[in-house]
Image (cartoon, rainbow, N blue to C red):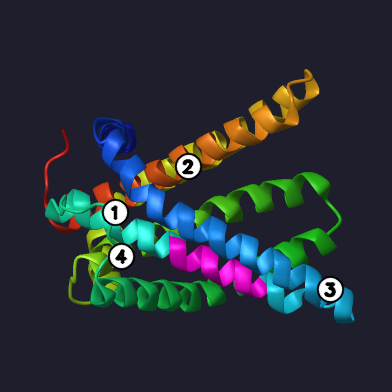
Amino acid sequence: MQAFRILAHALRQVFGNFRQALVMSVLPLMVGLAAGLGLFVIGAFAHRQDGSVGGFLFTVFLILVLLMAWLAVRWHRFVLLDESKNLLAPPSRAAFWRYVGTMVLTVILMIPAMLVTIGVLYAVHQGGIPALTFIAILVLSVLLYALTLVLGTALPGAAVGAHRPIGAAWSALKPAAGTIVLLTIMGLVSYEVIEAMLDMFLAIGLPTSLVVILSAIAYWLSTFIGLSVVTTLWGHYVEGRPLR
């Protein structure tokens, strides 16, 4: 099936370029750790002064989003444009801000779908039928994440400077609705499996520090696999590249 071919292609992207992925991750990780440490000190001081941590948490979130965009742009351009020189360098400012702008627009476009989902779930829940509520949550969650995957496919296009990447991704993926839904289900199941395994490691008594390290490795890998899935979707459906 096409969804499995896309996932296999994405896995080959990651593990076939594992060293490059590690190198790309070094500088964002160092910047993130330095910023996190500095913000932790500032946040602790602010909490002692007035007990407020809202601004601190928002700043941490914003930095994480920008670092994620940094890493994503480098990876998309490495795969799609073979931009393999100086992998430690940050992406060009133009590519970075195109990516961030497309991310913001994607979030804005998701808001109506999220509001509709919340409204439907509330109405179903008010009906008082637990089984129907569970089914509605399951179906609507898959559809919402599938929409996120479609819109997220525009991000590699933004990274490489494509014209109107959201419109291009939407048009190209219309015939692949079943593939998108199946990829979404596979992603959600994979996430739940990872969470269950980490909980099991804690339950059987593995040291917390080891579980934290395993969690970091698992989420690092899942991040690159997710980036590779949308890169593959863009490359195959929009640019017409063959799947290996």
Q: Nearer the viewer, residue 166 or 144?
A: 166
Q: Which residue is mark 4?
A: 154
Q: Nearer the viewer, residue 77 or 152?
A: 77
- Stretch of the chain drawn in magenta: 58-67
3D distance between C-alphas at marks 2 and 1: 17 Å
The alpha-carbon separation of the residues under discs 2 and 4 comes to 22 Å
Q: Which mark sits nearer the N-terminus, 1 or 3?
A: 3
* Residue for point 71% across, 62% down: 121
Mark 4–mark 3 Cα distance, whole angstroms, equals 40 Å
Q: Which mark is residue 220?
A: 2
Visible in this render: residue 177? Answer: yes
Q: Nearer the viewer, mark 2 or mark 1?
A: 1
Which of these two is toward me, 222 or 217?
Answer: 217
Residue 41, position as x, y percentages in the image: 72, 66
CA gap between label 1 and label 3 equals 35 Å
Disc marking residue 47: 3
> Mark 2 or mark 4: which comes first in sequence?
4
| Vertical comparison of 199 with 147: above or below | above
Residue 182 percent across, percent down from the top left? 42, 41
Which mark is drawn over residue 8?
none
Label whose residue precedes the other's in the sequence (4 or 3):
3
Residue furthest bottom in the image:
50
Which element is circle 3 on? helix
- Say if residue 153 shows up in the picture: no
Q: Is residue 218 magenta?
A: no
Q: CA distance from mark 1 to mark 4?
A: 24 Å
User: Which one is earlier in the sequence, the residue at label 1 or at label 4?
Assistant: 1
Residue depth check, mark 2 versus mark 3: number of the one nearer the observer: 3
Residue 187 located left or right of residue 85: right
Q: As shown in the figure, which amino acid type bears the numbered disc 4?
A: Ala
> Please, what secondary structure does the residue beneath circle 1 have?
loop
**Distance from label 2 to label 3 (Cα)?**
31 Å
